[in-house]
Amino acid sequence: MAKVVVLGAGISGHTAALYLKRSLKKDHEVIVVSPNSNYQWVPSNIWVGLGLMTPEQVKFKLAPIYKKNGIQYKQALAVSIHPEGNESHEKPFVKIKHVSEDQKDQEEEVEYDFLVNGTGPKLNFAATEGLGPDKFTNSVCTYDHAAHSWNNLELAFKKMEAGERQSFLVGTGHPMATCQGAAFEYILNIAFEVTKRKLNHLADMWWISNEYELGDFGMGGAYVKRGGYITPTKIFTESIFKEYGIRWIKRAGVTKIEKGIAHYENLEGEYLTKEFDFAMLIPGFAGAGMKAFDKNNDDITSKVFVANGMMKVDADYTPKPYEEWSAADWPSIYQNPDYDNMYASGIAFAPPHTMSKPMKSKNGTPITPTPPRTGMPSGVIGKIVAENVAHRIKTGKNEHPHKASMAKMGAACIVSAGYGIRQGQAAVMTVYPIVPDYDKYPKWGRDIKHTVGEVGLAGHWMKLFMHYMFLYKAKAKPLWWMIPE
């Protein structure tokens, strides 16, 4: 009997665990280790941050789902990986620290035959002084953060209703932050709600981002088909912002937050500030912070992980100029190159480089979006890793019939631009492939036939439908595996 340990129960880890158990059935063990007792559908947290959904509508308890599906669940934090075992363990193991009330702070060493690292990101608020919901800015990265953001946003709305002008600042809170998409949705929805309340004359809405141009989204931007025309996402995004009355600051790396003041540096090397009454800024992401040790208990963390704590996989990490970057650099099976029974999925894997052209300020500060890997890519990668691990267990062969390179994978994104059954809006965007491939598509970097963008009410209905559909899937309801990632 083989034992597979999955670290993390987010979109990628949870998806991997469900597919592993469905394939391996009772013949093998699947164990999930996660400090979180709840699963959350992260894309809907922006609606929690607007008071349009409650936290209960975007989350559910993990334990009953895992029990029902025969998956062992340990509510614990993964502390270290020991891929060679040690004197006490012949087999590889992971050291965990329990966080549940009945076992709090107890340590356990869990052996494995295969390990899937789906821990997702550490929300690195500490990398920017003053950033975060316990400091001077808000967040929609978790349902708790989003609920806290709504409390503060509601206060801002009430001040406006009393005639007090309010300034809103939304975007990225670190020079190399990602997840511009979530921030983009949030500011559009704030603007939509301000308009609905007829408070536009009292609102100053500002977008601040490390993107070189609007619409970069950490993907190097894109060209989309819209209304029969080929439009760069720069124009697509600028037009939406102008329609919603949002002004912007781009090429900016936020370096410090004080109460009501954001300090930032731009590519020109200028140190500037922007005042705000309400701010929601996405932090930089880092790996979960696990260590790794060999059989002699020597630290091999730098062998297994890159500097930011994300796991090395089958990517080309060779340092080389931007002009030499290639779609072929990106991983396809997410297997660790040194330990072939370890995999990393979703945000836990280390990309070989950014998708956007790297930029530095005149002072030498990198100000560039890092690659997004949330949502659909995370789910697809989780599924592919699970299928390959199951195949190896069943056949005994170290082969990978399933591939999922982001350079050969398409993605669909529905960007909420206002909530309402009759008046809601969303921008529907598809890109193929996610990672630009200028060798194959020299003109646009992507297949323009499958890279489109449209805005309208139908998009909002689709996003709302997807909210319920993917929660249904995550709860492993009947025929859940028929729903695509």
Image (cartoon, helix red, strand yellow):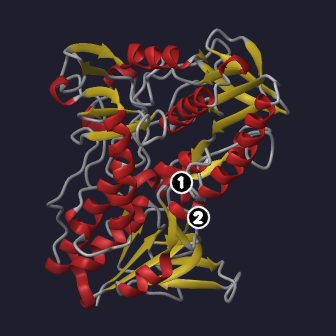
From what the image shows, is residue 203 above or below residue 123? Answer: above
- Residue at position x 28%, y 71% from top? 19
The location of residue 15, given as percent across then percent down, is 35, 65
Name the residue rendered at 23%, 34% in the picture. Answer: 432
The amino acid beneath tag 2 is: Asp
Return the residue at label 2: 299
Which quadrant holds residue 329? top left
Q: Nearer the viewer, residue 300 or 156?
A: 156
Side of 406 where 199 appears, left or right: right
Tell me, yes or no, if residue 338 can be seen here.
Answer: no
Q: Give the amino acid type for the residue marked by disc 1 in the picture.
A: Ser
**Above or below — where is 478 with respect to 289?**
below
Measured from the top left, where is residue 8 in percent x and y?
A: 48, 67
Q: What secondary structure is marked by label 2?
A: loop
C-alpha distance separating marks 2 and 1: 8 Å
How far from the left and from the top, in percent, is residue 96?
58, 77
Instruction: Quarter of the image for the N terminus: give it.
Output: bottom left
Tell me the quarter of the image containing the C terminus.
bottom left
Categorize mark 1 by other alpha carbons within 10 Å: few (<14), some (14-19), many (20+): some
How many numbered badges does the structure rendering display? Answer: 2
Q: Is residue 59 left or right of residue 275?
A: left
Mark 1 falls on what kind of element? helix
x and y percentages locating residue 409 in the rendered image: 24, 42
Q: Nearer the viewer, residue 431 or 244?
A: 244
**Number of the label disc, if any, that sits on residue 302:** 1
The residue positioned 57% from the left and 58% from the top of the image is 288
